[in-house]
Amino acid sequence: MFPQRRMRRTRIRHIQPLLREIHLTKNDLIAPLFVDETISSPRPIESMPGQFRYPINGIAAVAAAHLKRGLRAVLLFGIPKEKDPVACSAYDEDGVVQQAVRRIKAEVPGMVVITDVCACEYTDHGHCGIVGESRNGPDLLNDPSLELMNRIAISHAECGADIVAPSCMLDGMVESLRTALDDAGFEDVLIMSYSTKFASALYGPFREAADSGFSFGDRSTYQIHYANSQEALLESQMDADEGADILMVKPAGFYLDILVRVAELGLPVAAYQVSGEYSMIKAAAERGWIKEKDMVLESLTCIKRAGADLIITYFAADVAGWLDEKQ
Ligand code: PBG
Ligand code: ZN
């Protein structure tokens, strides 16, 4: 006790860095990328200042620039030319993500390519799979949608995707995908499951970015309510049991209590700092109310401190640059 233990000794300016527990590195980061089949030059995403949709023929260059910055992994989202009720363009061998994966793997072979496996960007109703009448009204139909996810994931694997990331929150999704991938000879393709995904207001800007807003209802019959932590844990536990290689908590910043507990399951865990978390920081920084760099580094370091092994963040390129600056 005082005066023997003086905590401020450990905070002496030049001692402090030696005692810091958490260091963010480039290996922690995954950069999301939006590939748009309908454009021929990069198009800014209004609700996410600094983020763009890229045309297919520009995507390999973007991935190459990321690799040059020291980022090792990208997470691809596609915006297709055509949408229909059953998401045919999501598993087309010449679909937008399929073409993008092939180009990145051909031109930037060192880049780890992760694909979002979901249907909401490819369905005209905007839901994450097949919808139909359930006994409780129109809803996402679980088991018919599993079949669709299998086809999407296999089509991505065929193009060279290293990791598939199912984000639809269907029951049985990981087991179904693992079996389908193995049967098709893709036992080396990892599954990073969006295992604990909350129905969140923080996805607002993404729906403009990926053109994936829904035409009826909401996602609350498949994503988890933010008030529930037992359910959140059970979801990740089940995906771990079904064979997921990497678990995920999404969004990240409001859900650190959940992240701590999911990390205890013992599998690698990714945390997704989502569009709303990005845009809130950007908006406040634009008004001069906060310092962007300080805010970003604090948010990401705290996500890592809570137990994230990987962080999916739209700030990935900025952070890579800041990490290169002299400390
Ligand atoms: C679609 C999907 C969403 C996000 C990633 N995949 C949106 C949603 O579930 O509504 C959100 C990402 C973000 O907000 O940055 N399954
Ligand atoms: Zn979806």
Image (tube, rainbow, N blue to C red):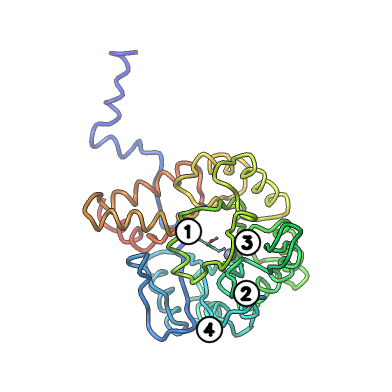
Count of all numbered marks drawn on residues in the image: 4
Pointer 4 residue: 81
Query: Within 8 Å: ligand 2 and the Cβ of disc 3?
Result: yes
Pointer 2 residue: 156
Residue 259 to residue 42: above or below: above
Of badges 2 and 4, nearer the viewer stands 4
Query: What is the distance, in whole Å, between disc 4 and disc 1 at their CAs?
Result: 22 Å
State the SS at label 1: helix
Query: What is the distance, in whole Å, between disc 3 and disc 1 at their CAs?
Result: 14 Å
Camera-side residue: 12 or 39? 39
Query: Within 8 Å: ligand 1 and the Cβ of disc 1?
Result: yes
Precedes in sequence: disc 3 or disc 1: 3
Query: What is the distance, in whole Å, between disc 2 and disc 4 at their CAs?
Result: 18 Å
The type of residue carrying mark 1 is: Tyr
Query: What is the distance, in whole Å, between disc 3 and disc 4 at their CAs?
Result: 21 Å
**Residue at image x 62%, y 63%?**
166
The type of residue carrying mark 2 is: His
Query: What is the distance, in whole Å, between disc 2 and disc 1 at their CAs?
Result: 24 Å
Precedes in sequence: disc 2 or disc 4: 4
Q: Residue furthest left?
A: 288
Residue 203 circle label: 1
Query: What is the distance, in whole Å, between disc 3 and disc 2 at their CAs?
Result: 16 Å
State the SS at label 4: loop
**Residue at image x 64%, y 55%?**
221
